[in-house]
Amino acid sequence: MSEYGLIATVFLAVLLGLFLWPDSLQEKVKKRCETYLENHGLPSQKDCEKIWDSFTQAFVGKDPCDVPPGAYDSLIHTVFQEPACNRMMFWSKTKEIVHEFAKKCSYVTLEGTPLGFLLNGLTWCGKKESQEIFTTGCPSWSDCVNNPVRSFWNRASAAFAASACGDAFVMLNGSMSMPYNPNSTFASVEVKHFNSSIINSLTVLLVTKEGDKKTCESDESLKNLQTDLGSNMKYQCKVVPQSQLQTCIVD
Ligand code: DVN
């Protein structure tokens, strides 16, 4: 191949690569916002722009280890969604199965709300004195507590839990030695933000696999959950074999 042919080939490959290059964060969030709009009539086109602006002002230009949950207050107040009383589902160490179950059986998880849907699985951060938005090279979940992604999920989880109303549910992993882990977001953020004047009960769905011996009564960590819920909150727990989740029957 001549030198010119090689240069042309490389040039075309780069051009194709750029065309296929995964969208920027803004493009991804914008597409998800439009999808949510089509499927739920929320938020409006104009709101998608407002949401993007509220979102970016929380972390752009800031040290990526100095973005506390409160930085997202304005974003949380930009998007309002009627809470799905009696259908709200929390979870811990059951990410895949809870979302299949919620979708099939019409429950609502945080990731099914507008903000959760927009940002689920994405990474983002900024840099001091820069207007750039990064999606790589950002602090990981455990690098520092006040990183942009972890702070968003803590703030959004607190708001989701505070709005929980009627009979709420949580899917916990019966294969874990401690299904209710005090370091989890569910325990350290969501349980602490339940509002006993609007939430009547919490039902634990303790999902077990073939051979798991875990029971609701024998698990020490679930006793801690009942203590954390306090006496105002009705509590119940059901062991649900994972195979049974397909049927949506959890009674
Ligand atoms: O009720 C749910 C939901 O509302 C959510 O907002 O909080 C609850 C789930 O959080 P959780 O109780 O901490 O449950 P997990 O399974 O321990 O963690 C949930 C997610 O947080 C994980 O799936 C991680 O996201 P990822 O990597 O799968 O996209 C993330 N996470 C938690 N601890 C982490 C972590 N990611 C990395 N390192 C860690 N130490």
Image (tube, grey):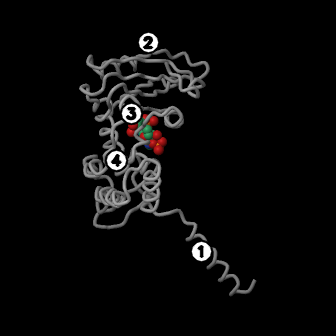
Label 4, label 1: how far apart the Cα atoms are? 35 Å
> What amino acid type should be assigned to the residue bearing mark 3?
Ser
Closer to the chain start, of discs 1 and 2, is 1
Mark 3 C-beta closer than 8 Å to ligand 1: yes
The structure residue drawn at horizontal position 34% and vertical position 60%, both measured from the top left corner, is 46
Q: Which residue is mark 3?
A: 184
> What amino acid type should be assigned to the residue bearing mark 1?
Val
Q: Which residue is mark 4?
A: 152
Q: Which residue is mark 1?
A: 14
- Point out residue 221 in the picture as x, y percentages from the top left corner: 40, 20
Q: Quadrant of residue 132?
A: bottom left
Label 2, label 4: how far apart the Cα atoms are? 34 Å
- Point out residue 192 in the picture as x, y percentages from the top left corner: 28, 30
Image height check: is 122 above or below 96? below
Badge 3, how many Cα within 10 Å: few under 14, some, many 20+? some
> What amino acid type should be assigned to the residue bearing mark 2?
Glu
- Point out residue 108 in the picture as x, y percentages from the top left corner: 43, 36
Label 1, label 3: how far apart the Cα atoms are? 43 Å
